[in-house]
Image: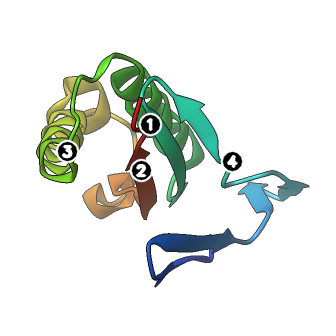
């Protein structure tokens, strides 16, 4: 289970997460949150759930941000909502083998700041 939290501190945010990833009996240390500049955005995000689905959603977020033309928080929010909806409707995500459909859920936090160019 991933422990992840975000706190808004004025115009800034503090994100934190544990660093353990588990696959069966194996446990490894990983960086679950890595701030980065993607396109016109500063972004930091972290997720919890089934590793391959978390990574897949993260890859989609990064690909979308690298091409997005959103320049307001509201436009960004609407585009992210559409991205998340499309992710869960993807037939490959729907077909991902799990014992309970709720296990396909990816939970997490994302902080994005539009860079004023």
Q: CA distance from mark 1 to mark 3?
A: 11 Å
> Judging from the image, what secondary structure is the residue with disc 1 in?
strand
Q: CA distance from mark 2 to mark 3?
A: 11 Å
Q: Is residue 49 above or below residue 12?
A: above
Which of disc 3 and disc 1 is earlier in sequence? 1
Q: Tag 1: Cα neighbours inside 10 Å, few (<14), some, or many (≥20)?
A: some
> Pointer 2 and pointer 3: residues touching (CB < 8 Å)?
no
Closer to the camera in the image, 83 or 12: 12
In the image, what residue occupies the spot 36% across and 36% down?
96
Q: CA distance from mark 1 to mark 4?
A: 14 Å
In the image, what residue occupies the spot 44% across and 57% down?
111
Q: Nearer the viewer, mark 2 or mark 4?
A: 2
Which of disc 1 and disc 2 is earlier in sequence? 1
Q: Is 54 on the left-hand or right-hand side of 23?
A: left
Q: Tag 2: Cα neighbours inside 10 Å, few (<14), some, or many (≥20)?
A: many
Q: Position of residue 2 (x, y in %)?
A: 62, 70
The colour scheme applied to this rendered structure is rainbow
Q: Position of residue 70 (x, y in %)?
A: 21, 32
Residue, disc 3:
72
Q: CA distance from mark 3 to mark 4?
A: 23 Å
Which of disc 4 and disc 1 is earlier in sequence? 4
Q: Tag 3: Cα neighbours inside 10 Å, few (<14), some, or many (≥20)?
A: few
Which of disc 4 and disc 3 is earlier in sequence? 4
> Pointer 1 and pointer 4: residues touching (CB < 8 Å)?
no
Query: Looking at the rendered structure, which numbered label has been put on residue 34?
Result: 4
In the image, what residue occupies the spot 21% across and 43% down?
76
Residue, disc 1:
41
């Amino acid at each position: 289970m991933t422990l992840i939290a975000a706190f808004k501190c004025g115009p800034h945010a503090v994100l934190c997460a544990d660093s353990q990833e588990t696959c069966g009996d194996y446990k490894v240390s990983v960086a679950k949150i890595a701030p980065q500049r993607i396109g016109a955005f500063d972004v930091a995000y972290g997720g919890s759930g089934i590793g391959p689905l978390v990574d897949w959603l993260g890859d989609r977020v990064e690909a979308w941000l690298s091409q997005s033309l959103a320049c307001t928080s509201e436009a960004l929010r609407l585009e992210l909502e559409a991205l998340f909806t499309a992710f869960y409707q993807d037939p490959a995500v729907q077909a991902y083998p799990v014992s309970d459909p709720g296990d396909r859920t990816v939970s997490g936090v994302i902080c994005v700041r539009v860079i004023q160019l």
